[in-house]
Image (cartoon, rainbow, N blue to C red):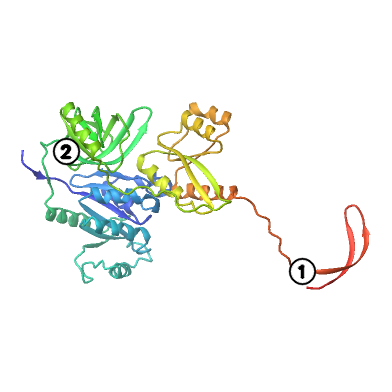
Amino acid sequence: MSNQTRPPIVVVTGHIDHGKSTLLDYIRKTNVVAGETGGITQAISAYQTEKITFLDTPGHEAFTGMRERGVNIADLAILVVSAEEGVKTQTLEALDDILAAKLPFIVAINKIDRPNANPELIKQQLAEKNVLLEGYGGTIPVVELSAKTGANVPELLELLSLLAEIQDLSANPAAPANGFVLEANLDQRVGVSATLVIKDGTLNTGDFLVIAGIVSKVKRLNNFAGITVKTLPPSAPAQVVSLTELPPVGATFQTFSDKKAAEQFATGELANPKKMGSDIPKPTGIMAENATEISLILKADVAGSLEALEKEVNKLGNEQTRIKIVNTGVGKIGDNDIKLAGATGNAIILGFKTSLEKSATDLVEKLKVEVVTFDIIYKLSEWLEEKIKSRRPKREEITVIGRAKLLKVFGNDKDRQVVGGVVTS
């Protein structure tokens, strides 16, 4: 079978709370935003309409890796900017990722229904960054819209279709599937699963999947809505359940109908590993003599969240504070995590969007291990910052506010003294 036109994969990116998820919510006619913790996206998600696959990326600064992966996987991008707040830090970060990937993109100036909306200011701010929009001396498409009311959203979708036609995106449905790992997680009930985005070929139940040298048989295949299916076509998001190991997010995948061929390919991958995205920065610098060390065990719901969690806690390390990450993992906090924390001494278990297994509750009490979980990344950071402050050595300072010369002692009782003197300064 020859190549056929495939739907575009579109990443929606930008600063936190500028309306990325609300825009997708309107397009999909669902209510995802209401179900998100704290009203902000903290994971990368893939959704599919009839003609387009969307990747929704989190805007918080901790999720740099997720935004970068979304851009690298996609064919097109929508840079969402609030008409009220304008160009912000993560707007520019997302823009840098788009430009680095040479990805065609549309600027969506959102929240034009708000009283303080100023779309012209956004165009000016972007022009100052050499991003010239249509009607503002450039060729980059721009749509002024409201994700809340739906105003001009149809125009945005028309522009996306036009850009996709220009890109001439194609795939061969008869070929073995290949693409990227968007996310990975571990659930005790179903084991290891991964969210994939298919760039070419068709993914089938029964295929042998190779990711970073790991070979797994596709035992169960779900579409983006969680419905079990037999096959998924090019551009589709896919959830593969019961993998043999947790795959690295951002890695490429390839499928084979024959297990032996898959294993041979996997051997070659192990010799030449390919992984997309940046590594988590490790703490650096010379530690001060009286520095505070805080040991942590980190657990998160999915691999991408764990990546963001590591980055966020490492940011708190400096000359006065050493962050020591004892262990990390994906999934619920279990007995082994508690035992490791107990053996380490004063290690704190930090969980992000995960919970403590019921079986481990008694062990926490017995070993007196501190376990703290959060559903919002910045609240976790605030808590850890306060914990670090509380562990720093206390230093007593004496401030002289005046001096006096003692002239006479009038009384010297057990609990008090009466003295006379003259103030010298």
**Residue displayed at 26% across by 68% down:** 130
Residue 152 visible to the viewer: no
Name which quarter of the figure residue 85 lies in: bottom left
Q: CA distance from mark 1 to mark 2?
A: 81 Å
From the viewer's perspective, is 237 left or right of 351?
left
From the viewer's perspective, is 248 left or right of 323?
left
Dot 1 alpha-carbon crowd within 10 angstroms: few under 14, some 14 to 19, many 20 or more = few
Q: Which residue is mark 2?
A: 233
Marks counted in the figure total 2
Q: Amino acid at mark 2?
A: Pro
Q: Amino acid at mark 1?
A: Gly
Across and down, in percent, residue 310 comes to: 42, 45
Dot 2 alpha-carbon crowd within 10 angstroms: few under 14, some 14 to 19, many 20 or more = many
Find numbered disc 2 in the image and state the secondary structure of the residue it sits on: loop
Find numbered disc 1 in the image and state the secondary structure of the residue it sits on: loop
Please identify the quadrant where the C terminus is shown: bottom right
Q: Nearer the viewer, residue 149 or 176?
A: 176
Q: Which numbered disc, 1 or 2, marks the residue that appears first in the sequence?
A: 2
**Residue displayed at 34% across by 47% down:** 279
Q: Nearer the viewer, residue 300 or 82?
A: 300
Q: Which residue is mark 1?
A: 402
Q: Is residue 189 above or below residue 293?
A: above
Q: Could you say which disc has been placed on residue 283 in the image?
A: none
Q: Is residue 50 above or below residue 125?
A: above
